[in-house]
Image (cartoon, helix red, strand yellow):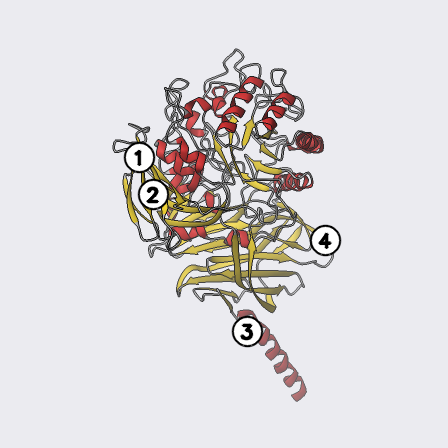
Amino acid sequence: MRYLLLAALLFSALFTSCNKAADTTDTIVSPDGKITVQFGLNDEGRPYYTCTYESAVVIDTSYIGGFEFKGHPGFDQDFTLMKSEAASAKETWEMPWGEQKTVLDHYNSKKFFLETPDRRRLNVIFKVYDDGIGFRYELPSQINVDSLLVTAETSEFKLTGDHQVWWQPGDWDIYEHLYHATKFSEIDAIKYRNHPNLNATYIPFNAVNTPVTLKTAEGIYLSFHEANLTDYADMTLLVDKDALKFTSGLAGSERTGGKAWISLPFKTPWRSIQIAKRAGDLIESKLVLNLNEPNKIGDVSYFTPMKYVGIWWEMHIGKSTWDLEGSQDMTTFTQGAKSGSRHGATTENAMKYIDFASANGIRGLLVEGWNTGWDKWINTDDREGVFDFMTPYPDYDFDAVTAYAKEKGVEIIMHHETSSAPRTYEKQMDEAYTFMKKHGMNSVKTGYVGKIIPAGEYHHGQWMVRHYQHVIDKAATYKIAINAHEPIKDTGLRRTYPNFIAREGLRGQEFNAWASDGGNPPAHIPTVAFTRMLSGPIDFTPGVFNIKFDEYKKENQVNTTLAQQLALYVVLYSPIQMLCDLPEHYYLPNGQLHPMFQFIRDVGVDWNETKVLDGEVGDFVVIARQERGTDAWFVGGVTGDRERTQEVSFSFLPKGQKYKATFYADGPKAHWNNNPLDYQINTAEVDHNNIMTVRMAPGGGFAISLFPVK
């Protein structure tokens, strides 16, 4: 009996030890000691974490690691912590192109090995940086299971208050919604389900797209996103107003009835939280990039960062059409088709753009509407097989245009609009990319306008995530760079696949040409800089000089001043920057180039260093960038609908070196609506010690070029 009692006590002690191990918490601290993540299991064996910044809680107790699977039991509790493994890293890596030349990757991490009583396993990995945290899940090989259909994943982000949030609806099909600024408790994505100008949209829940940016009452900035989204579904964030928390909500598929097929072992994308005391630090952060793997494709010198012009804006404002038949400009979708041939992609028109680009040091030309099929690309349920990517319209002499461009030193950018028929595109990619390389083309703008074919799939679901990745992989084998429109969101994969140079993935300039709601409001850019731009490069297509374009459309306009259009080349990062207006709009009535155009000729597109000088989300932002390979600096500032007097400190300049500063600014009477073309240009000699004041008009901005005085 004594032995039985002793055995029973020993068993009880062992069982209690296991429970105590389950209740044990562990911590990971950032290299600078300011951010601490606490990980643990509650008394039900549910994994959770909290996060503090400078000892203040910024993420309260949030449960993670919950999964549901189709046809298999899921898990979110009854875990035991088997062991943990700590690691640290500090290295510097170089960007082949980007906002800066080198990036510091410095973090502390821990991997937690969890197991249920029936031996199902889950690993949770945290990386903690000075600028935020990331966590991801590993699903190891399981007993008698080699693949699973994920139907839900639970990753919580519990807030500490009813924070201010800059958000757009959690749409499974598009990122082209406006941003809204509300308290967390006031988020209402369902209200924006049926925007008349969106070609594809699906908002199933009250959720937000990422990146989503917040500001606490204490002045701490948070931005939630994800990194390394491959072979999984896009994560929106479901809104729980009562609990003041976000929970991951994956984009789904009606064909599979789930969210993501995974083959075991499997690693999910990272769930990321940027944390900053200053709004500008969010832009300077490289957290999302650092959570991705190093370059896998090697040399990408076939792509050179560039400015480009294009046969594009003229279709949006209604001057020209994509199709030879003369019906498919944007008025097709807003006012009904017009008849008569106004085809934009003609040989003569392309050569006009080439002449303009060559004369002004612009490296690239994009031509949209060059290939047959545009008369059927959107007005049919069966869009598969509508396009091929080798057959030009008869009024576009492909060989003559490419030969002329080569003679003038201009590189043609290919355009592949898939009309959201990715299976057609995949069948033609080898032939299309071979055709491109034959004609000396190294980059392509892809498009996915419309609802995805096959029905039941969405732009942001796993099926399309796999397609976008397939395009990048295939393009890399042909040494081709991709600029995707209607894309999957950027999650830092440009580090791993630097041939993915840019994407649209936001409400761009084009909405100013035809949106029925009046276009992008003045607060749009100061919001985008602290939200969408945190994910990666934006092909926003700046550079409109004909702000009102009344000769084509009286009901629409660009809602900025001319000076702000210049500032966009610095504020909105992309290694490719369009001069989107018609060439004739860059000239004065006397035939001379507009004086403000000089800044666009001068401004860089590839940067050695980036500094955010000042800014507030949705209000204004001022950014300075040093051009890679030179000593030149460029500064851009934009404001929303309020006039602002901005101090600009030149302390970022190297000590002991004087610079010639040229200020391209709003004129004294400038206003985005009443007088958008009022401008002034001034010069001064400045150095590291100077501070100057610049006025920004409502909806305005300024741009500064800084060249060393020799």
Residue 704 lies, with reference to residue 112, above or below; the image says: above
From mark 4 to mark 3, how far is it between C-alphas?
32 Å
Q: Are the residues tagged 3 and 2 within 8 Å (C-beta)? A: no
Residue 185 lies, with reference to residue 46, above or below; the image says: above
Identify the amino acid type marked 2. Answer: Asp
Residue 421 showing in the rendered view: yes
Marked residue nearer the N-terminal end (4 or 3): 3
Marked residue nearer the N-terminal end (4 or 1): 4
Using a 10 Å C-alpha cutoff, classify the residue at mark 2 as few (fewer than 14 neighbours), some (14 to 19) or many (20 or more). some
Image spot of residue 16 (x, y percent): 57, 76
Residue found at x 49% / y 25%:
356
Read off the residue under disc 2. Answer: 619
Marked residue nearer the N-terminal end (2 or 4): 4
Read off the residue under disc 4. Answer: 146
Which one is in front in this view, the residue at disc 2 or the one at disc 1? 1
Q: Residue furthest right?
A: 144
Read off the residue under disc 1. Answer: 666
Residue found at x 62% / y 60%:
122
From mark 4 to mark 1, how far is it between C-alphas?
62 Å
Identify the amino acid type marked 3. Answer: Lys
Residue nearer the viewer, 386 or 612? 612
Identify the amino acid type marked 1. Answer: Asp
Image spot of residue 707 (x, y percent): 40, 43
Give the structural element (helix, strand or loop) at label 4: loop
Residue 532 lies, with reference to residue 290, above or below; the image says: above
Q: Residue furthest bottom?
A: 2
Marked residue nearer the N-terminal end (2 or 1): 2
Report whether 352 appears left or right of 546: right
